[in-house]
Every structure is written in structure tokens, then in C-alpha cells.
Image (cartoon, rainbow, N blue to C red):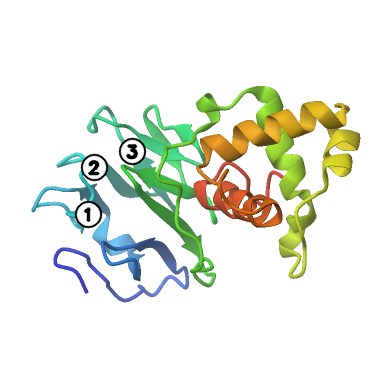
Amino acid sequence: MPNGVIRVNDDNTGISACVFFRDETGRQQMTSLVAATSRLTIGRGQGADLHLFWDNEVSRLHAQLEYVGDDWVLGDDGLSRNGTYVNGERLQTRQRLRDGDVILVGCTAMTYRVNHLPPLPDTKVAQTLVTVLSLSQTQRQVLTALCRPYKAGAQYATPATNQQIADEIYLGIDSVKNHLRALFDKFGVKELPQQQKRTRLVELAFRSGLVSERTL
């Protein structure tokens, strides 16, 4: 396990909270969050509890996780230069985390899980930072409609067709195609084959937190 990455046992509360992420080699790592620990810092500096030393976009002291009541709360409070994102939205102060939330610090995406299995390991976050603010309202609607067939974790789902997207959000087919082309470009998948880039766009939308099962 990389230097500075901690992994500790769950406490006796029956609640198992963890964050999953990929290290500098691409291997999935887990950090368990224990109430007795109370607070963990995230950063690139040697003193950080969650030591993301390989990510040059992460500040020396970037953010912190704190146990408040029965929940873990993520805070930034201006600690980072590039900001901290939860489900694609920039964190302004502190936010109580919910199961499945995706945290982005620098170029490192972390998934917060409570009493659940880790996220699927087959997708990497896009190299270009895509957030709610970098997408128009219509692009967000198109992206959500594209992912709609994956609601409730459907195992054999495929991305929505252009016609299904058009019918859902009341756009013409040509307009849907134009918005999808813009999304392919923003997520860096435009060079992939047509059906492959639609599937990859769905994967990256979930991975970045811009779409989740709660929002479908």
C-alpha cells in the first residue's frame, strides 16, 4: 500500500464507512473511516492522513473529513487551490456525505460508501475536469437522459438512443446530436467508436458524480 495511505478496521457501531480511490499505479485503494478517528486530512503534504502524493493538482492540505453526529462531513474552507468537488459541484464550505457520493480532489476521484461494496473498478475519471458549472442546463439534461436506462443499477442496460433522449427532454434529434458531440468533446471520448463513446460517456458521468442513481 502506498506510503501515507491508511487502512483501519471498522469500529463497533455497525456502520462501515469507506472511501475508495485509485493510487498512482491505477490500483484501487480503500480508506476506512472510523468514528474514533474523528478527523482525517486529505492532501499532498507528508502530514496528510490521506496522502495523495502522486497528484500534482492536490494542495498540500486540500480538505478534511470530520465525524459529526452519525455522519462524515467533508470540508474545504479555502484550504485548496483547485477546489474540492462533490458529485460535480464545487464544495463551498462543508457538506454531509451520503452513500455513493463522488469526491474529486485534484485529478483523484474518491467514492464514499456506507455498508456497501466498492464501486466498479473498470473506469478511470476523465483527465479533463468536468463539473456541473462547465455544462449547460440542456447538456446536463441530455447526459441524464443518456444514463436513464441504468436506473436502479440495471445490469444489462445500454445508453438511451437519440430518439429516447429527444422524447424525454423535448428536443429535436439534430439538437440532441449536437449536445452529445459537445459532451463527447468535454469528456475526452470523441475519438472512440460511436457506441463505445456513448457507453464510456455514461461511465464517466457516474464516475464523476454528475449522474447518480439518486438523480435518475
Q: Which residue is drawn at 68% across and 48% down?
A: 214
Helix, strand or loop for disc 2: loop
As measured in the structure, the alpha-carbon distance from the residue carrying label 2 to the one carrying label 3 is 15 Å
Report which residue position mark 1 lands on: 52
Residue 176 in percent (x, y) is at: 78, 32
Residue 160 location, x and y as percent?
80, 49
Location of residue 91 by image quarter: top left
Q: Residues within 10 Å of mark 2 (few under 14, many from 20)?
A: many
27 vs 166: above or below: below
Asked whether the residues under the numbered discs 2 and 1 touch, taking CB atoms below 8 Å apart as contact, a structural biologist would say yes
- Earlier in the chain: of badge 2 and badge 3, it is 2
- Left or right: residue 66 versus residue 95 is left
**Residue, x 75% and y 34% (percent of image)?**
177
- Residue appearing at x 25%, y 52% in the figure: 39
Please tell me whether residue 197 is drawn above or below residue 63 in the rendered image: below
> Which is more N-terminal, label 1 or label 3?
1
Give whichever of discs 2 and 1 has the lower sequence position: 1
- Tell me the crowding category of disc 3: few under 14, some 14 to 19, or many 20 or more residues within 10 angstroms, Cα based: many
Could you say whether the residue bearing mark 3 is in a helix, strand or loop?
Answer: strand
Residue located beneath label 3 in the image: 75
The amino acid on which the numbered mark 2 sits, given as a three-letter code, is Val
- The residue depicted at 43 percent of the width and 64 percent of the height is 17
Residue named by callout 2: 58
